[in-house]
Every structure is written in C-alpha cells, then in structure tokens.
Image: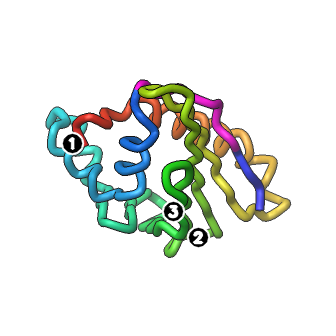
Amino acid sequence: MDIFKSEVVSINCSIEQIYAKLSNPESFNAIVENMPEEAKSKMSKATFEKDSITINADPVGEIKLNIVERVEPTRVVFAAAQSPVPLQVVISLEKTGDNETQALAELGVELNPFIRPMLSKPLQDGANKFGEMLSKLPYNLM
C-alpha cells in the first residue's frame, strides 16, 4: 500500500474535543447545517453517519469509508467499504498543550505500478489538503 502523509498541522483545540468529533462522523452534520447555501449544495454529495462517511465522487461513483479503528484520543482509521481501489485514511492526533493539538493525515492507497506515477502527486496533494482541512474545522460547532 502506498502511503501519502500530510504536513503536521496545529489545531487550537483540546485533543479530547477533536477526537470526539472525528471519531463520530455524524457530528459533521452540524457543520453542514451552519454552512452558507452555496457551500451546503457542494456537501450534498456527502452523508455522515455514526461510523461512516459516504461521498459521491464523480466519475468514480460512491465511496464509503467506515471507521475500522478508534484509539482514544490519538487515532481514527477509516477504510473503504466501497471503492474502486483499496483505500485507508488515518488521522493521528498528538496533544501539545491544554488547547493545542497536532494532527497528521495519511492516505493509504493500493496503486497499480503502472498508474502510480500519474496518481502519486494528486494523492499527495489530497493528503495535504485533508490535513489542512483538519486544522480549519470548527470543532466548537460540531
């Protein structure tokens, strides 16, 4: 499996609060409800349930990620239940202060050696964007 790691990001929130939200994807529904209408329409392709996230990704189709591991309060692992390729997303958290946490996102993808050169850069960019998104989520609204 090829692993693509994000940059380590800092989040101004307690590790316990971040873990509580990330380990329960259903809590993302509160964020979607508070988004402007334009952003909300883009999120209509995603559904958040207690143990899974489902995304309708054109042209690939529906991708469902289930939580397969929870290590409180430092790690949440999602694995694809429906995906054209084996896929895993690992979120690692580290407490650096009372209200300061560092996060790292890892994308693990089983790539065919022939397509690896074409997809490595976009997947690395995706891992970095995922890490950046972790640092910007409004954990207090969730």
Kindly state the secondary structure of the residue where label 3 is placed.
strand
Seen from the viewer's position, the closer of residues 39 and 77 is: 77
Q: Any mark on residue 11, and which? A: none
Residue 71: name its quadrant: bottom right
> On the image, numbered disc 1 is attached to which residue?
40
How packed is label 3: few (under 14 Cα within 10 Å), some, or many (20 or more)? some
Name the kind of residue labelled 1 in the image: Lys
Q: Nearer the viewer, mark 1 or mark 3?
A: 3
Name the kind of residue labelled 2 in the image: Pro
Whole-percent x, y for residue 20 in the image? 37, 51
Q: CA distance from mark 1 to mark 3?
A: 28 Å
Q: Nearer the viewer, mark 3 or mark 2?
A: 3
Q: Are marks 3 and 2 in contact (CB under 8 Å)?
A: no
Name the kind of residue labelled 3 in the image: Arg
Q: Are marks 1 and 3 in contact (CB under 8 Å)?
A: no
Q: Is residue 25 left or right of residue 41?
A: right
Kindly state the secondary structure of the residue where label 1 is placed.
helix
Seen from the viewer's position, the closer of residues 142 and 15 is: 15
Q: Is residue 107 left or right of residue 36?
A: right
Whole-percent x, y for residue 37 in the image? 14, 37
> On the image, numbered disc 2 is attached to which residue?
84
Q: CA distance from mark 3 to mark 2?
A: 24 Å
Whole-percent x, y for residue 130 in the image? 52, 40
Q: Are marks 2 and 1 in contact (CB under 8 Å)?
A: no
How packed is label 1: few (under 14 Cα within 10 Å), some, or many (20 or more)? some
Residue 83: name its quadrant: bottom right
> On the image, numbered disc 3 is attached to which residue?
70
The residue located at (16%, 38%) in the rendering is 34
